[in-house]
Image: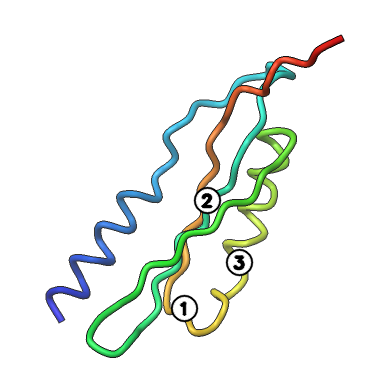
């Protein structure tokens, strides 16, 4: 049980947002979804990524995801958004 609590605590720390919001149109965002699911002998961590065109779209999706239950068989699910610089466009 102590190991499970440690894993959950680490997942919460990793899920903290690390990027600050900017108004630059050249900024894209990626949503990271971290899910914890029980498996024989412990807990499995699953990570998914979902790209967005803007940070605001990512935050809106994150808010929507927070009110929904995690996808089975996950017990807990954390979502956070991170900004990424868009690649330069060539003319």
Residue at 69% from the left image edge and 36% from the top image edge = 56
Q: Is residue 38 left or right of residue 4?
A: right
Q: Is residue 84 left or right of residue 87?
A: left
| Tag 3 near tag 2, CB within 8 Å | no
Q: Nearer the viewer, mark 1 or mark 3?
A: 1
Badge 1, how many Cα within 10 Å: few under 14, some, many 20+?
some
Residue 67, position as x, y percentages in the image: 61, 66
Q: Nearer the viewer, mark 3 or mark 2?
A: 2
Q: Secondary structure at mark 1?
A: loop
Question: Which image quarter: residue 84?
Answer: top right
Compute the Cα span from label 1 to label 3: 15 Å
Q: Of all residues shown, which one is farthest toward the left?
A: 2
Badge 3, how many Cα within 10 Å: few under 14, some, many 20+?
few
56 over 27 or under it: above or below: below
Mark number, residue 3: none
Report the quarter where the C terminus lies: top right
Mark number, residue 32: 2
Badge 2, how many Cα within 10 Å: few under 14, some, many 20+?
many
Q: Which sits earlier in the primary sequence, circle 1 or circle 2?
A: 2
Residue 85, position as x, y percentages in the image: 61, 22
Report the quarter where the N terminus lies: bottom left
Q: Secondary structure at mark 3?
A: helix
Q: Which sits earlier in the primary sequence, circle 1 or circle 3?
A: 3
29 over 24 or under it: above or below: below
Q: Which sits earlier in the primary sequence, circle 3 or circle 2?
A: 2
Question: Which image quarter: residue 9?
Answer: bottom left
For label 1, the residue is: 74
Q: Of all residues shown, which one is farthest toward the bottom?
A: 40
Q: Secondary structure at mark 2?
A: strand
Question: Which image quarter: residue 53?
Answer: top right
For label 3, the residue is: 67
Compute the Cα span from label 1 to label 2: 15 Å
């Amino acid at each position: 049980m102590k190991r499970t609590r440690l894993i959950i605590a680490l997942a919460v720390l990793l899920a903290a947002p690390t990027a600050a919001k900017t108004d630059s149109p050249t900024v894209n965002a990626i949503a990271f979804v971290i899910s914890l699911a029980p498996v024989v002998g412990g807990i499995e961590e699953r990570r998914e990524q979902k790209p967005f065109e803007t940070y605001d779209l990512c935050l809106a999706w994150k808010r929507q995801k927070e009110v929904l239950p995690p996808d089975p068989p996950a017990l807990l699910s954390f979502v956070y958004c991170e900004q990424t610089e868009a690649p330069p466009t060539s003319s």
